[in-house]
Amino acid sequence: MADNTKLAAEIRTKFGKGAARKIRANDKIPAVVYGHGTEPQHITLPGHETMLIVRQANAIIDLDIEGTAQLALVKDVQRDPVRQVIEHIDLVVVRRGEKVTVDVPVVVEGESFSGTIHVQDLSSVSLLVEATKIPEHVVVDVEGLEDGKQILASELELPSGAELETDPEALVVQIVTPRATADDIAADEEAAEAGAEAGAEGEAAASSDDDESASDSE
């Protein structure tokens, strides 16, 4: 595991809002580690290093809790709704080699056929993957896809060893022609038809005038 996922944690003995504020004032973050039948452990984490790690979804942290090694998955990050400061983190104990169910972001790449756009119906999919091999995201390539094309969860290209937990029939991305574009095309077609009709009427009128002129000359 990369060194930038290793954090030294301290066991926390004081609780409550006041204690949590003091921890954050010292550039540290309150957290709890639980799971696998173990008693929850309340700890503090270094603020800056932790913030860098939790930018990635489903981050795995290699904890050193006062000399005891523990692998943990970031389960929940609670932030202040206004300042977006991390207030608390929930960590789940994981074992190397075990599989966990996580929600992985879906990223759309490429440009669909000219005049169309892609509509993303699912922003993430649920996968069963090895805890130490959680992908950062799943890519959907829409390059050149035409109007009406739909990509279901079952059609996603998943990393080796990953299993889909989301409904296979769930719609992830669809390609559509924007309504404004469709209306413009219809308007252009109507204008072209009207122009053609006007042209035909003009030709007919010109022909009639020619006939009348010829008749007068006689």
Image (cartoon, rainbow, N blue to C red):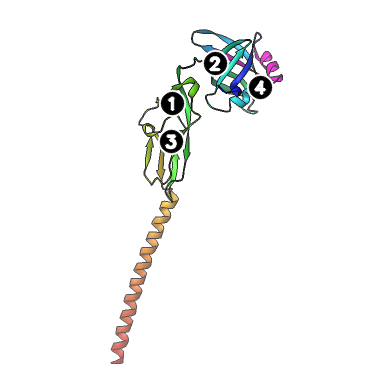
Identify which amino acid the numbered label 2 is placed on. Answer: Leu
User: Label for residue 47?
Assistant: 4
Q: Secondary structure at mark 2?
A: strand
Image quadrant assignment for residue 25: top right
**Mark 3 Cα within 10 Å, few/some/many (few <14, many 20+)?**
few
Q: Position of residue 145 (x, y in %)?
A: 40, 45
**Mark 1 Cα within 10 Å, few/some/many (few <14, many 20+)?**
some
Task: Please say if the residues under marks 2 and 3 sit with CB atoms less than 8 Å apart.
Answer: no
Taking 124 as reference, is 9 above or below it? above
**Mark 4 Cα within 10 Å, few/some/many (few <14, many 20+)?**
some
Question: From the viewer's perspective, is 120 left or right of 210?
Answer: right
Which residue is labeled 2 in the image?
Answer: 71
Which dot, 4 or 3, sits closer to the camera? 4
Identify which amino acid the numbered label 4 is placed on. Answer: Gly
Which dot, 4 or 2, sits closer to the camera? 2
Real-space CA distance between mark 4 and mark 3, rounded to the nearest whole angstrom: 35 Å
Real-space CA distance between mark 3 and mark 1, rounded to the nearest whole angstrom: 14 Å
User: Magenta residues, as a range?
Assistant: 15-33
**Mark 2 Cα within 10 Å, few/some/many (few <14, many 20+)?**
many
* Between discs 3 and 1, the one toward the N terminus: 3
Visible in this render: residue 80?
no
Identify which amino acid the numbered label 3 is placed on. Answer: Asp
Identify which amino acid the numbered label 1 is placed on. Answer: Ser
Q: Position of residue 121 (x, y in %)?
A: 43, 36
Which dot, 2 or 3, sits closer to the camera? 2
Real-space CA distance between mark 4 and mark 1, rounded to the nearest whole angstrom: 29 Å
* Between discs 2 and 3, the one toward the N terminus: 2
Which residue is labeled 1 in the image?
Answer: 126
Instruction: Examine the structure image and report whether residue 32 is included in the region drawn in magenta.
Output: yes
User: Label for residue 121?
Assistant: 3
Real-space CA distance between mark 4 and mark 2, rounded to the nearest whole angstrom: 18 Å
